[in-house]
Amino acid sequence: MKFKQIATVALTTLAVSAPVAADLMFPSLSYRTGPYASGGIPFADGYADFFTMLNERDGGIGGEKAVVEECETGFSTPKGVECYEATKNNGALVYQPLSTGITYQLIPKASADGIPVLSSGYGRTASADGTIFPWVFNFPTNYWAGASRIINHIIDNDGALEGKSVALLYHNSGYGKEPIRTLEALAEKHGFNFTKLAVDHPGQEQKSQWLQIRRERPDYLLMWGWGVMNQVAMQEAANIRYPMENFYGIWWSGTELDVLPGMASHGYKAANFSVVGSDFPIYDELQKHVIDKGLAAGDGSSVGSVIYNRGLYAGMVVAEAVRTAQAMHGVSNITPAMMRDGLEALNMNADAYARNGMSGFGPDFQITCEDHGGTQMAIIQEWDGKSQEWKMIGDFEAPDMDVIGPLIQADSEAYAKENDITRRDC
Amino acid sequence: MSADFLYTLEVILNGLMAGVMYSLVALGFVLIFKASGIFNYAQGVMALFAAMTLVGLQSGQIPFAHLINAIFGTDLHHFGWQMPALLAIILTVGVMVLFAIIVEKYILHHLVNQEPIILFMATIGLAYFMEGFGDIMWGSEIKTMDVGIPSGGSFWLEEVTMTWAAEGERYWGMYIDKLDVVATLVALVLVISLTLFSQYTKTGRALRAVADDHQAALSVGISLRTIWVIVWSIAGFVALVAGIMWGSKSGVQFSLSLIALKALPVLMLGGFTSIPGAIIGGLIIGVGEKLFEFAIGSVYLGGATENWFAYVLALVFLVFRPQGLFGEKIIERV
């Protein structure tokens, strides 16, 4: 009798908590706690709010409800892998690991399990090569493209870099080290001196690095930081009066959290792959179907911020891939393999952005079996201290593929050799 | 003078002041260990909690607003006031005293005469509880600490020292952060006050008696409960000072609790029971790690050597003086 009762309770709990088999399941490996929570929360909110809006407005995607299953990683790689293992059998269609460390761990696992991984703007850059990484996507851009876009922006605006110096202040982790190879290749091509300055996790203490920057006075400073490292670096830059107009961050160092009050950060720039601001029709839809109904994932304080927009963007491209997959296979309840087909046929053109109420929100690109990285375009934004907001300068532009293309090919070939992978015939 | 010499001098000076910042955190550990034999794992989180409380009070943030809004569907955020920094500091000290009373009443009181490892584990639990509690109370977003402490490089010093280098050398003057200078002065006042308190007051002597032996202290009429509340209150105050200084650098956010990691090598080196040891240990660690990074780390090892080098330095000292430079030598008869 007792066993029966326990079994009944367990089954009822499972029935209530587990997603319905027909739901479209999107695990969200979020980090709402820990040292990087201030960046993790807006992304997770944006991602969840986008799918809530689709459920409320359209009844899901193609008639199927979208379910976002959050699992807290605390930005820790082991916890991220645990989250993957805990959620992969719930019908997961695609993973966005939100950490380069977790992405590196999930690449072989998800490839073996046949579940797509999408690491937009982070992860392993070489995974843009779809013939070696059939289950991994990193559109619309990656760290190597970001580095190249920043260097191109400097050259376009300030002239040739021949004989000048560029320093990279980076988080001493897989993420922070990603652009080094590209910057070394670009230094060789453009003739600038390249210096690397590593900052250990979490980046609270950077005195040595900033004394070195003050001594050597690099003409340009690039930053690959995250969390507290960004805030400390910005304060130290202001302290030593480093010219903000020559200071560039990657997209994880270009949020409202990373700049100082007043004019101290005025002129600081960052690369990005989605635009800033909330002047898009999608925001009216979110207001009507999510926020006004009290269904928002967060308290509303981050709505419209740089990282919230990135979360929305991540949700939108996934939803578009689902629609593509549903159309390709003629079924609404798709499998992870069908999801991959949808991702490989994803065409993010002006029409796709417009039907999501997000015209101009991101770069145009088309994914194929061979190319999982897209056009790799990025845009530059600048902090305006007067209005205390980020402003876009210029447009989405492609990186220097003459440099990046061979690097991606070399790295993907090395990965294939290491892991005994045969190049896929597309 | 050669620019290289002046830059080395700059690194040493900045190392000394970075060391003072580490010492501010280490002091809290020493105080509690000295008086109760507990290695307080929660000291870093106490600094975070104190700083969050200070900023919350100053900006008029409503505590537990997220929780209240989630339960009752309200839209509460701020009281609408801007509290003067000094008043906010005084109130925060009050909160830390209240925290000390609660810790004593609900945790330490039940663990009298337990093994040190049990007490240590209790502080681990306390640290994780406070992390979550602080988040629920004040939210996890990054907050700006502004209590009027000057920061940034000193223009005056830069200009004065600019001409010290030999002609033609690339030298930009000596750099010292004004915030570090303030931290040094505050640490100096703290150490002198705490040393005098511990050595020359009745309560200070009682603190030391409790540290030596709980039962013996009780037998001569010392109230263990009062002493523990006092010592945790002082440690809470020191945590607030550390939270203000570090929070002014990086903003008040979760990472502030990780500054405890910078205090551990200082404690290993300076000893767990010496207040001056915490300062001297901090200075040695600060200068040692900065000089190593300057001369070897950034040149030959790719940089970012400070975190591990501080521990290597502390380990080397431990080999020769296991009790630390100023720690009390423990002799137990068989």
Image: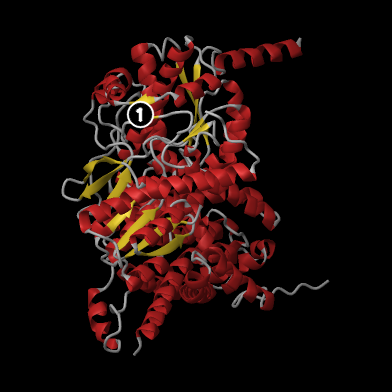
Front residue of A149/B253: it is A149
Q: Quick one: label 1, few (<14), some, or many (20+) residues within 10 Å?
A: some
Classify residue B298 as left or right of residue B157.
right
- Tell me residue B176's x, y (percent): 33, 74
Name of the residue lying farthest toward the right: B334
Check the image and tell me how it is coloured. Answer: secondary structure
Residue A263 percent location from the top left of the image: 20, 55
Residue B38 in which image quadrant: bottom right
Residue B160 versus residue A306 in the image, above or below: below
Instruction: Look at mark 1 in the image and give the residue it sits on.
Output: B69
Q: Quadrant of residue B270?
A: bottom right
* Disc 1 element: helix
Q: Is residue B294 visible?
A: yes
Outermost residue on the left side: it is: A386
Task: Count the numbered circles shown.
Answer: 1
**Residue type, mark 1 in image:** Asn
Depth order, front residue of A420/B39: A420
Judge by depth and name the residue closer to the eye, B166 or A234.
B166
Q: Residue at 73%, 10% (x, y): give it.
A: A4
Task: From this view, report whether residue B32 is shown above or below residue A269.
Answer: below
**Above-or-below relation of B115 to A376:** below
Could you say which quadrant of the image residue A40 lies in? Answer: top left
Residue A124 can be seen in this image? no
- Residue at x-position 33% and y-position 14%: A57
Q: Is residue B11 above or below residue A75?
A: below
In the image: residue A397, left or right of residue B244: left
- Taking depth in this image into account, of B317 and B220 the one nearest to the observer is B317
In the image, residue A36 lies at what x, y percent?
44, 45
Instruction: Name the chain under label 1.
Output: B
On the rendered image, what quadrant is the N terminus of chain A found in?
Answer: top right
* Image location (x, y in percent) of residue A15: 59, 13
